[in-house]
Structure formats: C-alpha cells, structure tokens
Amino acid sequence: MKFKILMIQYEKVLSKINFFADQSEVIDFLLNRIEISFLEPEQTIVSQNDPLYRDIYFTGAGLAAVFKSIDSRSRVKVDTIEEGKMIGVVSVIYDCNPQTSVEALSYCTIATIPNYDFKEMLCFFP
C-alpha cells in the first residue's frame, strides 16, 4: 500500500515537470524504474565531484539545498529545491561528475532513476 501511494505521488510529481508534461508513456516507463529513498535532514542526495552520483533524482516531499564548494573548507548555498525538481541532469547528459552538492533540509522523499534507465528513456522517447 505504501509503495502504491508513493507511485501515485511520483506520477503527479513527474507530470508537473515540463520535460515530461503530457508524456504518459514516458512517465509510466520511469515509474517502473524508480527507486524511492527516505532522507533525514542534512543527509546527502548528491555530492559534488563524486562519480557515484551520476543518476537523475526527483524530489517528492520535503526541501533540499544546493551547495557549491569554493575550496576544501568552504561552500556556498546557491539554491533551495522543492517538490518536483530534477537533480543530476547535467551529470547524466554530459557524462560528468556533479558540479554541486545537494542535501536534505527536512525529511524528504527522493526518487532515483539510474543513469542507464534515463539514457534508455531518451532512446525510446526522443
């Protein structure tokens, strides 16, 4: 039951994103491949320059902050992310490490679409 509720939530989230608007086949494709995570405040969603974070992430409930590291000791908050935002697109499309870090500001649900599934979606639905 919990999983079905989350799928309904993410169907609504994905349909609000311009990239997927009116693309029910694409949304169904993605819903069958997402992995949902529950995060606590200050938990890392994406870490700058870390090659392990090359997937696409969608925010469900909660808030997250985007940080840009200036040097090894300091970083600057550059944005706040709310429900329905995509994270990681630049890393996937350009096949590079993330240029920023993203951390949960509150309890969050995050849907992850693995890099290869997102690229497969681009091939099936150009």
Image: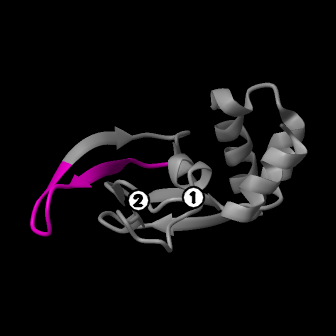
Point out the image quarter for the C terminus. top right
Few, some or many residues within 10 Å of mark 2 (<14, 14–19, 20+): some
Residue 96 x/y as whole percent:
50, 59
Give the magenta range. 60-76
Type of amino acid under label 1: Asp
Residue 99 x/y as whole percent:
37, 54
Secondary structure of the residue carrying tag 1 is: loop
Few, some or many residues within 10 Å of mark 1 (<14, 14–19, 20+): few
Camera-side residue: 22 or 120? Answer: 120
Secondary structure of the residue carrying tag 2 is: loop
Identity of the residue drawn at 45% across and 62% down = 97
Query: Label 2, label 1: how many angstroms apart (C-alpha)?
Result: 29 Å
Residue 95 - label: 1
Residue 107 - label: 2
Task: Please indicate, yes or no, whether residue 48 appears anywhere in the rendered image.
Answer: yes
Residue 57 - label: none
* In this rendering, position of residue 61 left or right of residue 33: left
